[in-house]
Image (tube, rainbow, N blue to C red):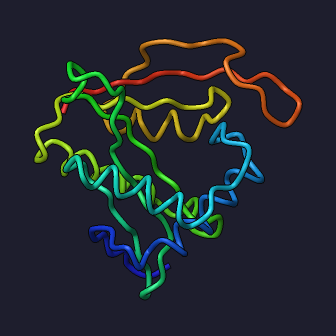
Amino acid sequence: MSDLVIRPYSFADIPAVTRIYDYYVRETVITFETEEPDEAEMANRFSAIVSKGHPLLIGEVDGKVIGYAYASTYRAREAYRFTCEDSIYLAPDAVGHGLGGKLLGRLIEDSSKAGLKQMLAVITAERANSIRLHEKHGFRMIGRYEALGFKFDRWLDIVHMQRAL
């Protein structure tokens, strides 16, 4: 796989990021969303992230969007304004090439530059690869919630991980 280019999000990325996210909604337990959002909804979500000054990054290989990462608001209350939650999504054929780690590394750096102080990861507990990725980037396990989500006819646990920025 060619070199990864990481750049800021632009509105023109909406079709590509929507396609990537749709796969995870339909096929995986990585997200607990059960219905695929349309492009307008994804644009609204991404506009909210950008309007807060939080990083929203696009990963490209050979000019093709292969993934994205962002730091969203952890909770809406004002006292949480310096805490963010990370999200990383890669096109299925881009998984396993170290690209998620590169996106996460840059997201951590850009989140710190944006004045954020803590980053949380909320991960489906059975996603050992996501847990390992976050551990490699300095996150520590802070808790596990049992049977918190129900998708594909089964109950799913989540874990929370945290790192200072």
Picture quarter with the C terminus: top left
User: Quick check: 111 left or right of 19?
Assistant: left
Residue 15 appearing in the image: yes
Q: Is residue 79 above or below residue 64?
A: above
Q: Position of residue 84 (x, y in %)?
A: 30, 34
Q: Residue at x 79, y 22 (%)?
A: 155
Which residue extends farthest right?
Answer: 153
How far across and down, in percent of the image, does residue 48 sit?
A: 34, 50
- Residue plotted at (60% across, 58% down): 21
Give the residue displayed 64% in from the left and 42% down from the top: 30
Vertical side of 33 occupied by 100: above or below:
below
Q: Is residue 117 left or right of residue 11?
A: left
Spot occupied by residue 116 in the image (x, y as percentages of width and height): 17, 36
* Relative image position of residue 134 (x, y in whole percent): 42, 36
Can residue 106 be seen? no
Residue at 25%, 45% (x, y): give it. 108
Q: Nearer the viewer, residue 22 or 106?
A: 22
- Residue nearer the viewer, 136 or 4: 4
Question: In the picture shown, does residue 85 fall above or below 68?
Answer: above
